[in-house]
Amino acid sequence: MTTRALAALAERALKWSAATTVARFALQFGAQVALARILGPDNYGVYGIGIAVLTFVAFLSGSSFSWNLMLLPVVDDDDIRFSFTWQLIVGSGCALAMYAAAPAIAVFFADARVEGMVQLLSIASLLTAASAPATCLLQRDLNFRMLGLIQLASYAIGYLAVGVTMALHGWGPYALGTAAVVQAAMVLFTSYAARPHPLRPLLSHAGGTAALATGRAVFVTNVVNWMLGNIDRVLIGRVLNAYSVGLYNVAYNLASIPGTLLLGALQPTFLAAGARLQDDPQRLAQGWRMALACLMVLALPAGVVFALLSGDLVHLLYGEAWSESAWVLGVLFLCLPAWACWGISTPVLWNTGRKHLEYMLQLPLLAIALPAWWIVAPSGIRAIAAVSALIIFARAAVVVIAALRALGLHWLVVAGPLARGAGLAAACALAVLTAQHAAAGSSLPGIALAAGSAGALAVLLLVLGVWPQLLGAEARAVLARFMPFLRAAPDAPFAARPEGLHR
């Protein structure tokens, strides 16, 4: 495939990812609000503990042996059979271990309900492992249209059709657990239907050593990432209680939705396309710089705006029972740009032969985070959220710096977009605060939230419509793919788009 054809395919994939990402955001947001209101913090906390365990086990077995299918220059049936075989072996072992460990996990958290939740979610663990080869093959094919539709349909059936119905009928936390299982089952069946692959077992073949080496690297990386992303909730459950886990988990999940969905669109696209540009580091660097610039310019103001609106958002959507989540939500919303920059930079390490750096660079941060979380845990979820935010920014910094070095780029390439994003964030923050102050005297529910959102949106529209050059050349070139009017605006540098992104 030529570079031009690959760029066109990647662009179509990115557009489909963006479209389905917006739909998934709306779907997940609505489902989370409905379920949180019906179930309350305590039930949500039991589910949150179970999900922390599921995430750990899924990281161990999820796609460790299928990841290699996205990185290989050419994939044949033996590669697929080998990955699928070992994926099932490891997935089955992890699911059985999760089921067997459920009683001990319930004792650890001093909540008998956790045992049934963990055992239920062990089924989701096995289903997730089994679906990994088909999912990775769809990502390799840059078929993000199908992937997005699968994710939308599976989440709607799992959490809206099954989860909400069971919650309304009094199933408590098990409504959420069953929803997770149904969603995983739907992903397995629909992804295999969309991308059938050989199922005949194959325990070894010529490329097995390299595949297992990649699997081990993914395995260790996933363990480190899980610990940095979930130990805070484990300690809350251990030191505090399920109620506190529920408060923290809802805030964490809501704050991470924009970043998770954004990375769900960008990271696999960049990884799959970058794997085909491993011999062309200049174009790889070009694509990464543009993606990073766009994220810095847009994610930074978005995080600040969301943080300022977090109190009104929690009050309107969840009610007074969840008010303690507002402060945590605001702090974690500020991490949105760091989450996004970290996620778009890790594929650079994998595509430049530095796959071990992702976990090696984060191990020192883990060594700092563990005692810090343990020390502050008795002080409550606010203190834990503050430590988590610092760790998220530190993770982003070390990975972005490593990506710069891997591509031979100077750190100044990120200084411009960072400054532009900070300036836009300040303007949006001023607009939000002004609008909230003006609406402070109104007794209408949600008026402060609506006013603040409108203020930030007005600033964004003003920049896009009147001063798009404030976004910078790289960010504007990316946005022009979705907003063609930006191409026609004055500012000569945009006429010369990077060659790697031509149609």
Image (tube, rainbow, N blue to C red):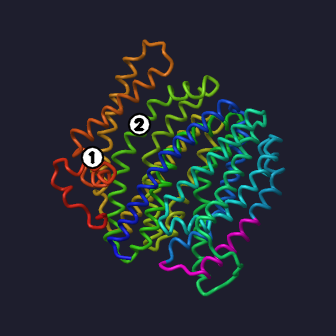
**Residue matched to label 1:** 471
At 58% from the left edge and 55% from the top edge, which residue is drawn? 150
Based on the picture, tell me whether residue 102 belongs to the magenta stretch: no
Foreground label between 2 and 1 = 1
Considering the image in quadrants, where does the N terminus appear?
bottom left
**Residue matched to label 2:** 304
Residue that sits furthest to the bottom in the current view: 206
Report the amino acid beneath label 1: Leu
Whole-number angstrom distance, CA of label 2 to CA of label 1: 17 Å
x, y percent for residue 162: 71, 43
Counting residues from the start of the chain, the first of labels 2 and 1 encountered is 2
Residue 391 appears left or right of 50:
left
Question: Is 137 rendered above or below residue 23?
Answer: below
Considering the image in quadrants, where does the C terminus appear?
bottom left
Residue 297 appears left or right of 128:
left
At 60% from the left edge and 79% from the top edge, which residue is drawn? 79
Report the amino acid beneath label 2: Val
Secondary structure at badge 1 equals: helix
User: What are the residue bounds of the magenta stretch?
Assistant: 73-93
Q: How many marks?
A: 2
x, y percent for residue 373: 61, 44
Within-10-Å neighbours for mark 2: few <14, some 14–19, many 20+: many
